[in-house]
Image: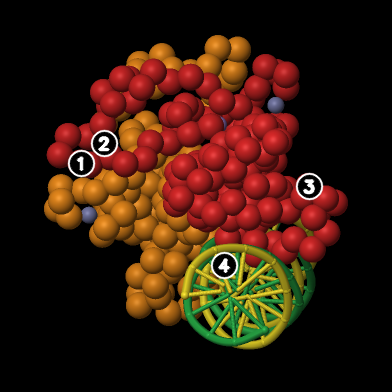
Chain colours: A orange, B red, C yellow, D green
Amino acid sequence: MNDHYDKIKNLLIQKNIRPSMHRIKILEYLLANETHPTADRIYNALSAELPTVSRMTVYNTLAIFTERELVHEISIGENESRYDIVTEPHGHFKCTSCGTIYNFDIKADLLASIEPVDFKVMERDVYFKGICPKCL
Amino acid sequence: MNDHYDKIKNLLIQKNIRPSMHRIKILEYLLANETHPTADRIYNALSAELPTVSRMTVYNTLAIFTERELVHEISIGENESRYDIVTEPHGHFKCTSCGTIYNFDIKADLLASIEPVDFKVMERDVYFKGICPKCL
DNA sequence: TTCAAAATTTATAATGATTATAAATACATT
DNA sequence: AATGTATTTATAATCATTATAAATTTTGAA
Ligand SMILES: [Mn+2]
Ligand SMILES: [Mn+2]
Ligand SMILES: [Zn+2]
Ligand SMILES: [Zn+2]
């Protein structure tokens, strides 16, 4: 029937997450907004469409998404976590002037090449900070 | 007179930080404990020797140390900041089993080589997570 | 369909690291 | 000593996140 929502549902089912309405809407938001939103940002954005949604559901949902590796949690030294629908490894740059968090490419084999030997590395985060071209 | 404390005092003076007793003791602790301690860890460790020290002073001092680049603040996805007296660039690995945060070498030119063009990069953090050799 | 167990969501309170504020104390300079 | 400045302290506030338990929805027999 509805191709758009079927795709989102399938993403959830593939990760063994039951596709409730709220989970679908939260995933839809993340797919449409690759801006590394916070839990609160998502909650506020969805409140219009889903007036009954609670903050706890957003937190719960993001926790299960993160656990199942459907999203990647970003902690770039701020006091709130941000969530990234792009799970392929890449670097993050935070502009200390405008606050924007940019993506930048890092070759996967380069990331592998710096891994400390004898450690089993499961997660790799590269966080840079400074001033973005717009603010320079 | 006292070589040990003179060295620590000079480190502070070089960074334009007035060498108060508490600041000296906090810096001494950081120099002797390259374990990426939290503010609370430092506070508790110093409480024995300086019974009157307040948590606020530890926070204030770490903030000024960070601002003057005498220490580096580490936010590896935990809810508390950690502080590193080693400011030369290097990577951090957190063992999700035992919680230890290890250092690992990263060639400075390699870090520079992945910087996004047209961005002014001021800070570079590489955080890996997984299982350390001891826990494997 | 009916009903009970399981999963999800909600409302509410608690947690805990950090920050804000203002008073107290220590330090430096005249 | 007196005065202004810097540091420290005690205390309360902030705020993202987590804990808890009740309410609601979904599921899968019977
Ligand atoms: Mn990203
Ligand atoms: Mn380190
Ligand atoms: Zn910017
Ligand atoms: Zn370990």
Q: In which quarter of the image is the N terminus of chain A?
A: bottom left
Q: Residue at x 46, y 45 (%)?
A: B15
Three-letter amino acid code of the residue under disc 4: Met
Residue B51 at least partly seen = yes
Label placed on residue A56: 4
Of badges 4 and 2, the one in the foreground is: 2
- CA gap, disc 3 to disc 4? 37 Å
Neighbour tally class for label 4: few under 14, some 14-19, many 20 plus, Cα within 10 Å: few
Q: Mark 2 lies on which chain?
A: A
Three-letter amino acid code of the residue under disc 2: Phe
CB of mark 2 within 8 Å of CB of mark 1? yes
Q: In this view, does A76 lie to the left or right of B78?
A: left
Three-letter amino acid code of the residue under disc 3: Ala
Of badges 2 and 1, the one in the foreground is: 1
Label placed on residue B45: 3
Q: Which chain carries label 4?
A: A
Residue A9 at least partly seen = no
CB of mark 4 within 8 Å of CB of mark 1? no
Q: Mark 1 lies on which chain?
A: B
CB of mark 3 within 8 Å of CB of mark 1? no
- CA gap, disc 4 to disc 1? 37 Å
Q: Do labels 2 and 1 share a chain?
A: no
> Residue D17: where, in percent of width, then height?
58, 59
Q: Which residue is drawn at 32% across and 48% down?
A: A94
Q: What residue did someone put label 2 on? A: A104
